[in-house]
Image (spheres, helix red, strand yellow):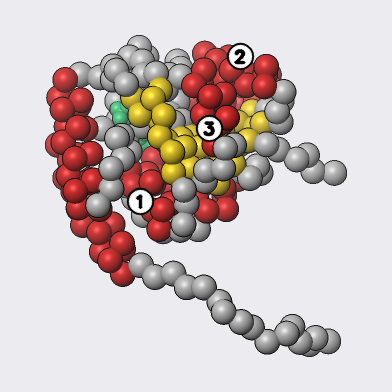
Amino acid sequence: MTKNYDLSLVIPVYNEQDNLRKLMQEIDSALEPLNISYEVVFVDDGSKDASLAVLNEISTAYEAARYISFAENRGQSAAFCAGFDEARAPRVATMDADLQNDPADLPAMLSLYNEGYKMVIGWRGKRKDVWIKRVGSKFANAVRNKLTKESVKDTGCSLKIMDTETVCAIPRFNGMHRFLPTLMKMQGATVAETKVNHRERHEGESKYGTLDRAIAGGLDLLGVCWLQNRHFSYSVKERSSDKDNS
Ligand code: UDP
Ligand code: MG
């Protein structure tokens, strides 16, 4: 018999060998007291360090943990989507693997989600990144909000909870993880935002440079604006009664 899960946690991993054990301990401490049934799906995005070996060890040590591993690096968006496809719970939480997000934020986010939203997004109150990244992110959020007519505080924060069915129905492309609130709203999702903790990265390195992220994000933004303008929805007024084909 398949187990019924309340929450699937999806975590993209690219060269994070020294963060994974502590991350899993923190998730365990944050979620065990909730008495819910959860799974942690790590998606190894073709790591070149020992991340895969560590994930193997973690999936043996913790019943809730499992992983899939890509043959080669495909990017954070691809890793998220592969995790969404694997998820067995009706709601999926996402976070980074580098311990910058804090699993201790999950219980409060889950209570907010359970008030009836299809998406809860964290916004990083005090960002613990270098100044260029903080300024770049503020600017990117402002431009993104202006062009997509949104008011999302921090779409770059990976800490989110979403309705699994809805997130599996949104368009998929490289960089889509930076536009999840807009893409989810296009599918009719109701969205709430909440302040979350943010921490410095102590192990491993950031995978993004400021300029390459700005260029890729800018081009993606044009694509998302196009998608938004061309988006349609419909409601069915009536349908003929079901016919039996047998
Ligand atoms: N990541 C990934 N594939 C990539 C780049 C990043 O799975 O090609 C993961 C990475 O391991 C981390 C998360 O995505 O868990 C965010 O990456 P990072 O911390 O480097 O981004 P930053 O915090 O600097 O924006
Ligand atoms: Mg990070």
Q: Which residue is disc 3 drawn over?
A: 112
Where residue 30 appears, as percent x and y from the top left, is: 59, 17
| Mark 2–mark 1 distance (CA, rounded to whole Å) | 32 Å
Quadrant (top left/top right/bottom left/bottom right) for the C terminus:
bottom right
Q: Is residue 182 visible?
A: yes
Where residue 2 appears, as percent x and y from the top left, is: 79, 43
Q: Which residue is disc 2 drawn over?
A: 29
Q: Earlier in the sequence, mark 3 or mark 1?
A: 3
Residue at screen point 56% across, 31% down: 110
Q: Residues within 10 Å of mark 1 (few under 14, many from 20)?
A: many
Q: Amino acid at mark 3?
A: Leu
Q: Is residue 72 visible?
A: no
Is 229 left or right of 62, judged from the image as shown?
left
Q: Amino acid at mark 1?
A: Thr
Q: Residues within 10 Å of mark 2 (few under 14, many from 20)?
A: few
Where residue 147 appears, as percent x and y from the top left, is: 20, 52
Q: Which residue is disc 1 drawn over?
A: 182
Vertical arrangement, residue 238 with respect to residue 46, above or below: below
Residue at screen point 23% across, 39% down: 141
Where residue 19 appears, as percent x and y from the top left, is: 46, 17
Q: Amino acid at mark 2?
A: Ser
